[in-house]
Image (tube, helix red, strand yellow):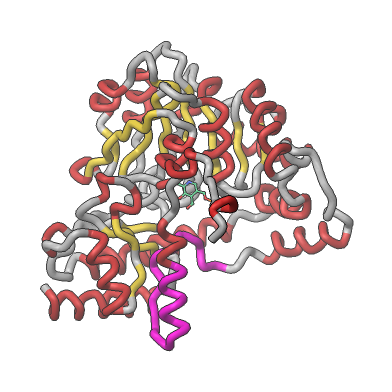
Amino acid sequence: MNTAHELHLAKRMARLGTETAFEVLVKARALEAKGRDIVHLEIGEPDFDTPGNIIGAATDALHKGFTHYGPSAGLPQLRETIAQYVSETRAVNVTPEEVVVVPGGKPIIFFTILALAEEGDEVIYPNPGFPIYESMINYVGAKAVPIRLREEMDFRLDVDELAGLINDRTRLLILNSPQNPTGGVLTKADIDGIARAIGDRNILVLTDEIYSRLIFEGEHHSIMSVEGMKERCILLDGFSKTYAMRADLATHVARLMTNSNSCTASFTQVAGVEALRGPQASVDAMCAEFKKRRDVMVAGLNKIKGFSCLLPKGAFYVFPNIKGTGWPSKKLADALLDDAGVAGLSGTAFGDFGEGYLRFSVANSIENIEKALDRVGSWAAKNL
Ligand SMILES: Cc1ncc(COP(=O)(O)O)c(C=O)c1O
């Protein structure tokens, strides 16, 4: 090759991580293309059809010309609807100026970290946790400081341990509840304790509540609702793929939108208004179905040699402990895909503290979950 045209990547690209779920999906599809039957428990995406009223609103909007650019921060009617929704569900007063609509959950993780953290700053994030946090913190050159989620605490964090990690360089704390990959849910006492641990320090909190509507026991608690915390929170709520934050930060995030995506597709925003204002029964039905699947999956895993699995309290993942198999997580996840046709993820795809665990998504039918359990059970009986 002509060395004059060698690819010179920016150094920062070496620090960018990835989300392994997409890589395993590609590998699983390649096996399917060769004729293998694979049960997909790797990707975290609800398998339910979008409710008819929301599809109707989207197609209507397409016919009505919502196919052009809109404001970078989002359509006024959607920002208004979201401000109302957040005000009601988080018991705080949120205005439309504090809302930015972006296309997905990841852009807000990207934009928030890009806008707030620089070299020398420390960002505390959950581990095991959604891998994009660590990837983005490293990418911007800040220091990634993991707070361990502990199985013995139902995969919640230890507030005293968190307090010990906070120092003068801490710029941002990332919370995620209900949590990916463990299904852990922070309690009201945890949230209050975290707010106390932050105290008066000038630290912002990115509170990722994308699974806030998928809670199986008790209720969802947001740190945004704690007295004095609203101005210090950036709320990421994935139900509507929208975000609420203080208005001064919102203008900068909107500028990052202008620079990167221009705006979120207008017709999907019209559908977003319908999703928030229309009937909510489908969300409750989806949650009830995930709970049934969770119960089947956890009961089945607990019967398999070497596996033990807690009952997750929210989201749609289970995170079995596989230390009893004697296998490292990545090797076990690979073997289950290659030999048993079950696609799951290694706990290490979510950080170093994920060693000793696997993640299975229950966004699949009970029939397929039972098929996966049979296959993993037979594999374990033969190989362990
Ligand atoms: C904890 C968490 N935050 C954010 C996201 C956002 O993802 P997306 O950009 O695909 O909406 C996800 C998706 O899996 C997630 O699990």
Q: Residue at x 49, y 25 (%)?
A: 118
Q: Residue at x 44, y 82 (%)?
A: 32
Farthest residue, direction top:
200
Compared with residue 331, is residue 140 higher up or lower down, i.e. above or below? above
Residue 212 in percent (x, y) is at 48, 45
Lateral position of residue 81 relative to residue 43, left or right: right
Q: Is residue 308 visible?
A: no
Farthest residue, direction bottom:
35
Residue 189 in percent (x, y) is at 32, 29
Compared with residue 123, is residue 260 higher up or lower down, i.e. above or below? below
Residue 368 in the magenta stretch? The answer is: no
Q: Residue at x 77, y 50 (%)?
A: 266
Compared with residue 76, is residue 270 higher up or lower down, i.e. above or below? below
Residue 248 in percent (x, y) is at 65, 21
Q: State how many labels appear.
A: 0
Farthest residue, direction right:
64
Q: Nearer the viewer, residue 299 or 146?
A: 146
Lateral position of residue 100 relative to residue 39, left or right: right
Q: Residue 329 is drawn in which quadrant?
A: bottom left
Q: Nearer the viewer, residue 22 or 201?
A: 22
Q: Where are the magenta residues, as a range?
A: 25-48
The quadrant of the image that shows the C terminus is bottom left
Residue 89 in percent (x, y) is at 55, 37
Q: Residue 379 is drawn in which quadrant?
A: bottom left
Q: Is residue 103 visible?
A: yes
Lateral position of residue 32 relative to residue 161, left or right: right
Lateral position of residue 332 relative to residue 133, left or right: left
Q: Nearer the viewer, residue 334 or 37?
A: 334
Residue 33 in the magenta stretch? The answer is: yes
Q: Residue at x 27, y 49 (%)?
A: 354
